[in-house]
Amino acid sequence: MNVRCIRAMVTGLLVIVSSTSRPGYAQTKPEPSLRDVLLEQWTDISEKVVKLAEEFPADKYDFKPVPEVRSFADQIRHVAFWNEFVEKSARGEKIDPAINELSRSEYPTKDKIVAALRASLRRATAELEKENAAPAARRAKLWVTFTEHSGEHYGQLVVYYRLNGIVPPASRGQ
């Protein structure tokens, strides 16, 4: 054997030995399923919206940046309604989209609104967890659309925080 072949073999063996001797390196994680990716994104934005709802002061829940837009409370009731829409749509049930937000009279306080938001997310997430690893395109679109919807409202709610001189939870130092 020539020196070049021996070097190549030794280098190859060193690579194999070093890669298998590091814990977890030789074992690669399996590629996540579409359902798992959707679940991760849905959960991430949902937790951010819940955190905003929980931490915004109760005495500011009726705050509106300008008279023509929803109050903070209305925004959260709106997100909670659409979470219910997603949950019921995922189960094949019909829900009237014209409703557009939970009733102010049924959910008048911060505590009731936050509880409704959490419950709607819990039920919707349970439906997503039932999906098979590769949901049909129509069902995947449902989750993508409403993950984006929650992200849009998250951005709006951050503005409500800033206009009240409050640093949003995700912007605070660790």
Image (cartoon, grey):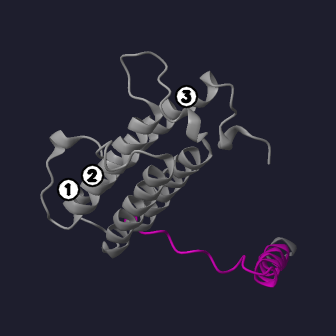
Q: Nearer the viewer, mark 3 or mark 1?
A: 3
Instruction: Return the disc, 3 or 2, that comes first in the chain's sequence.
Output: 2
Does 163 sit above or below residue 40? above
Q: Are marks 3 and 2 in contact (CB under 8 Å)?
A: no
Residue stretch in magenta: 6-34
Instruction: Tell me which residue sits at (69%, 79%) in the image.
Output: 26
**Disc 1 crowd, CA 10 A, few/some/many (<14, 14-19, 20+):** few
Q: Nearer the viewer, residue 13 or 112?
A: 112
- The residue to which callout 1 is attached is 138
- The residue to which callout 2 is attached is 141
Does 74 sit above or below residue 88? above
Across and down, in percent, residue 55 comes to: 62, 45
Assign a secondary structure to mark 3. helix
Q: CA distance from mark 3 to mark 1?
A: 34 Å
- Horizontally, residue 97 falls left or right of residue 174, namely left
Does residue 18 show up magenta in the picture?
yes
Q: Quadrant of the N terminus?
A: bottom right
Assign a secondary structure to mark 1. helix
Q: Are marks 1 and 2 in contact (CB under 8 Å)?
A: yes
Instruction: Return the disc, 3 or 1, that comes first in the chain's sequence.
Output: 1
- The residue to which callout 3 is attached is 160
Q: Nearer the viewer, mark 3 or mark 2?
A: 3
Instruction: Tell me which residue sits at (52%, 75%) in the image.
Output: 30
Across and down, in percent, residue 90 comes to: 23, 63
Instruction: Tell me which residue sits at (61%, 39%) in the image.
Output: 57
